[in-house]
Image (spheres, helix red, strand yellow):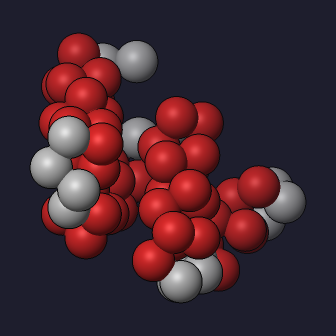
Amino acid sequence: MPEVVFTQLKVAEVYETRLSNDHEALKILEHLLNEAPDSLEVMRGLERLYAKVGRYSVEIEAKKEGKT
């Protein structure tokens, strides 16, 4: 995993866990999905946050099923 992706994952984690700002964490992870579309960590984070805020991503589901 590229270092910039790893760093942004950590920033998203801080927004989610320490700052209780799920929406900002989602913005970062949604951006990362474009940068690292095969990253399991990004997909898991998005899935967790979408469930937390009551959203669902068809794109994440399609990637899990291998359609993209």
**Where, quadrant-wise, is the C terminus in this rendering?**
bottom right
Question: Looking at the picture, how far across and down is residue 16, in whole percent?
Answer: 29, 50
Residue 29 left/right relative to 14: right
**Where, quadrant-wise, is the N terminus in this rendering?**
top left
Closer-to-camera residue (4/45)? 45
Residue 39 left/right relative to 15: right
Question: Looking at the picture, how far across and down is residue 55, in whole percent?
Answer: 52, 83
Closer-to-camera residue (21/26)? 21
Quarter location, residue 21: bottom left
Q: Residue furthest right?
A: 65
Residue 56 left/right relative to 30: right
Closer-to-camera residue (55/36)? 55
Question: Looking at the picture, how far across and down is residue 61, in whole percent?
Answer: 72, 68
> Would residue 42 be seen by someone viewing this image from the given angle?
yes
| Residue drawn where x is 41% and y is 41% of the image | 36
Residue 51 lies, with reference to residue 7, above or below; the image says below
Closer-to-camera residue (55/61)? 55
| Residue drawn where x is 20% and y is 40% of the image | 18
Quarter location, residue 53: bottom left
Residue 68 lies, with reference to residue 13, above or below; the image says below
| Residue drawn where x is 51% and y is 69% of the image | 52
Residue 4 lies, with reference to residue 24, above or below; the image says above
> Would residue 38 be seen by someone viewing this image from the given angle?
no
Q: How many marks?
A: 0
| Residue drawn where x is 29% and y is 23% of the image | 6
Quarter location, residue 4: top left
